[in-house]
Amino acid sequence: MKNYQRCRIKCWFIYLAVLLSTNVLAQRAWTLRDCIDYAVTHNLPIKQQDIKAEIKVLDQQMALRERLPSVNGYANGYTTFGSSQDVFGTIRRNDNLNSNMGINAELTLYQYNYFRNQAKKAASEAEQERVEKEILKRNLTVQLMEAYLQTLLAQALLVSQDSAMQFSQQLLDKAEKSTAVGATAVSVVAEAKANLAREKQQYQQYHKDRRQSLLKLAQLMNYPDYSNLELAVPVVENELLQGHAFSDSSSLREEAFVHNPVFAKLRSQAVGLEVESKLVKAALFPTVKGSAGLGST
């Protein structure tokens, strides 16, 4: 009996430990970097863009293989049987069994670099899809930063409003005590109750705003349960000041031109248009092909 009770107590301790560990994991503090990394991994448009980029890579590989010679093989077999009569009336048997097989190859020798430009066009389109993914990631990061900061602001307002509500409750208690001893008028109690009601109403509004901001943040992250989304304490001011310093506006503008994915996409599109013009121009030039075959009857 004692062993049974000991085993039961151990089972309860194990259950409590697992429950506490689950709560700790559910209540993890999400930093801004954690939110961005989770959103980039689970965002559906970004996943779709990855598939489009893989398709363009396959198109590029197919375009490169178009430059290789095409090889075909064939094999035929046929038979004839029966009798035939010549002009002299002689009847002869005419039974034949014939077959042939062979292989031939064909290669485009000249077409104004059509296949090479086709491969360049496919490579340009693959690069555009990759840059489009970076644009989606940048836009998602900006939206996440806005939603994250909005949620932190809503949390700060909720905490400050909770303090204001407690202060109004203390003023009401003080007014009721002073009115009970006849030190203040009854109107002071009524005014304190009205102030407390306003503070409670404002608290409910801030609580609603916080839940809405959390819901928006969870939606951007594609997080399943927004109610368990707890944000970490924001960074201190010294950490915010640790960053790259630019000497003037021209260097800042140059840095933006280099790293902005929109400009990279435009440059890739310009290369694609140039290659497209060469492909159109290739239709005006003759096509020279060479072929070779080997067969046996």
Image: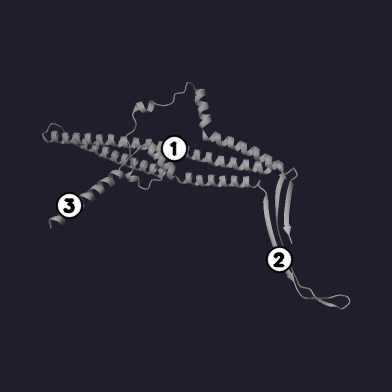
Q: From the image, state whether disc 2 or disc 3 is nearer to you.
A: 2
Q: Earlier in the sequence, mark 2 or mark 3?
A: 3
**Where on the picture, by quarter, is residue 34?**
top left
Q: CA distance from mark 2 to mark 3?
A: 86 Å
Q: Give the residue pinned by disc 2.
A: 77
Q: Dot 3 corresponds to which residue?
A: 9
In the image, what residue type sits under mark 2? Answer: Gly
Q: Quadrant of the C terminus?
A: bottom right
Residue 205 percent across, percent down from the top left: 32, 40
Q: Residue furthest right?
A: 88
Amino acid type, callout 3 = Ile
- Which tag is nearer the camera, tag 1 or tag 2? 2
Which residue lies at the image location 44% right of the left edge and 41% below the top edge? 40
Foreground tag (3 vs 1)? 3
Would residue 187 be seen by someone viewing this image from the given angle? no
Looking at this view, is 92 or 256 the one in front? Answer: 92
